[in-house]
Image (cartoon, grey):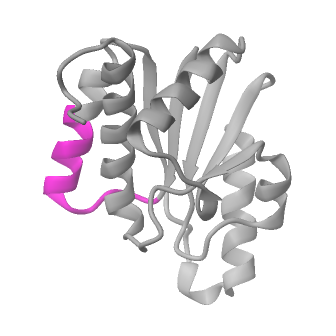
Amino acid sequence: MKILLLVIGKTDEHYLVEGIHKYCTRLRHYIGFDFEEIPDLKNRKSLSEPQQKKQEGVFIISKLKAGDKLILLDDKGKDFSSIGFSKHLQQQMNSGIKRLVFVVGGPYGFDDSVYAKAQAKLSLSKMTFSHQMIRLFFVEQVYRALTILKNEPYHHE
């Protein structure tokens, strides 16, 4: 199985880019992992919120392949402990899915067309984080989950 983290917009802060790169590099020792940025919409300020979500949705859906499982990072999604998330990832790996696609949406969330394509929603916290920070938190949690599955000493209970 491979994992793709798909995000809307560029990560601006250098410290976040550095952290994301660090964990993406570590992840590739465990699993096929890709991080892909969909460029910000042009003329975003001239578009309404629904128009922005719709256009972002077109880009998100265009990145999907047959056999992908789409999971949206969404504040209304299911939440896990780190160990629970590692078990969930193991179940996904055992299920025969070719590629697990996680998506961090734009500032207004997802269009209904994206929700309709998604098989699941995942919440990393009841708190709200910036769309750029959640990228780093997510790649670290995937790394943590894989080290838990390998029984490596990164995670402590």
- What residue is at 69 percent from the left and 70 percent from the top? 53
Left or right: residue 87 versus residue 142 is right
> Percent x, y for residue 96?
71, 11
> In which image quadrant can residue 70 be found?
top right
Magenta highlight on residue 135: no
By secondary structure, the bulk of the magenta-drawn segment is best described as helix
Q: Which residues are magenta?
A: 9-22
**Quarter the N terminus occupies:** top right
Specify whether 98 is left or right of 113: left
In the foreground, 20 or 125: 125
For the residue pair 145 and 40, the one nearer the viewer reads as 145
Q: State the residue at coordinates (23%, 31%).
A: 155
At 26% from the left and 42% from the top, the residue drawn is 20
Name the residue: 62% across, 70% down.
109
Residue 116 in percent (x, y) is at: 86, 54
Please give the count of numbered marks on the rendered protein.
0
Query: Please, is residue 117 above or below residue 85 in the view?
Result: below
Q: Is residue 51 left or right of residue 13?
A: right
Viewer-proximal residue, 143 or 58? 143
**Residue 110 visible within the image:** yes
Q: Quadrant of residue 145?
A: top left
User: Can you say whether 152 is above or below 44 in the image?
Assistant: above
In this picture, is 46 found above or below 11? Answer: below
Residue 117 percent coordinates (x, y): 82, 47
Asked whether the viewer can see residue 64, the reply is: no
**Residue 98 found in image quarter:** top right
Residue 132 location in percent, x, y?
35, 61
Q: Residue furthest front?
A: 157
Asked if 16 appears above or below 131 in the picture, the reply is above
Residue 11 lies within the magenta run:
yes
The quarter in which the C terminus is drawn is top left
